[in-house]
Amino acid sequence: MASYRIDRLEGQLQQEIALIIHQQLKDPRLGFVTVIGVELSKDLSHAKVLFSCLGDVEQRQRCQEGLDRSAGFVRSLIKKRFRLKVIPEIHFQYDESIAGSIAISELLDQVKAEEHRRENDSEGREG
C-alpha cells in the first residue's frame, strides 16, 4: 500500500515541479528543462528530481546551478500546494539516460547508413 502511495505522489510531484519550473522560475540559466521523474525516499523526506535539458555540458551545468539555487523556492511552493506532513527536500539531478539514448540512436543511424552505402556499392559493381 505504501509503495502505491509513493508512486502516486512521485507522479504528482513530477507534474507540479515541471509546472513550477516552466511557469514560475525566471532564471535565464534554465533554458529548456524537462522533468523526467521524481524518486522519493521511503520516509518522504527527500525527493530526487531527475531532469534533462538541451545543450552541451556547459549548458547542463548552468541548468543544474539554476535548479539547485531554486530548490528552496520550489519546495516552498510544493508546501503550499500539497497537504503533506513532511515536505521533501528537493535535490535536482541530471538524467544521463536521455543523452545515452540519443547517442545510441545516432550510432544506429550511422550503421544503417553505412549498410545502405555498402549495398549500393555492391549493386553498382554487379551491374
Image (cartoon, rainbow, N blue to C red):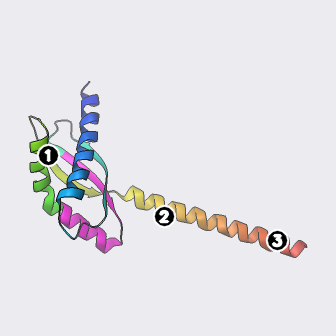
Sequence-first tag of 1 and 2: 1
Question: Is residue 95 located in the magenta-colored stretch of the structure?
Answer: no
| Magenta range | 47-67
Q: Is residue 81 above or below residue 100?
A: above
- Disc 2 versus disc 3: distance between alpha carbons? 29 Å
State the residue lying farthest toward the top: 1
Residue highlighted by disc 3 = 122
- Disc 1 versus disc 3: distance between alpha carbons? 62 Å
Sequence-first tag of 1 and 3: 1
Residue highlighted by disc 1 = 78
How far from the left and from the top, in percent, is residue 22?
A: 24, 58
Residue highlighted by disc 2 = 103
Q: Quadrant of residue 5?
A: top left
Q: Amino acid at mark 2?
A: Ala
How far from the left and from the top, in percent, is residue 92?
A: 22, 56
- Disc 1 versus disc 2: distance between alpha carbons? 35 Å
Q: Amino acid at mark 1?
A: Ile
Q: Nearer the viewer, mark 1 or mark 2?
A: 1
Q: Is residue 90 above or below residue 55?
A: above
- Asked which secondary structure carries label 1, the reply is helix
Sequence-first tag of 2 and 3: 2
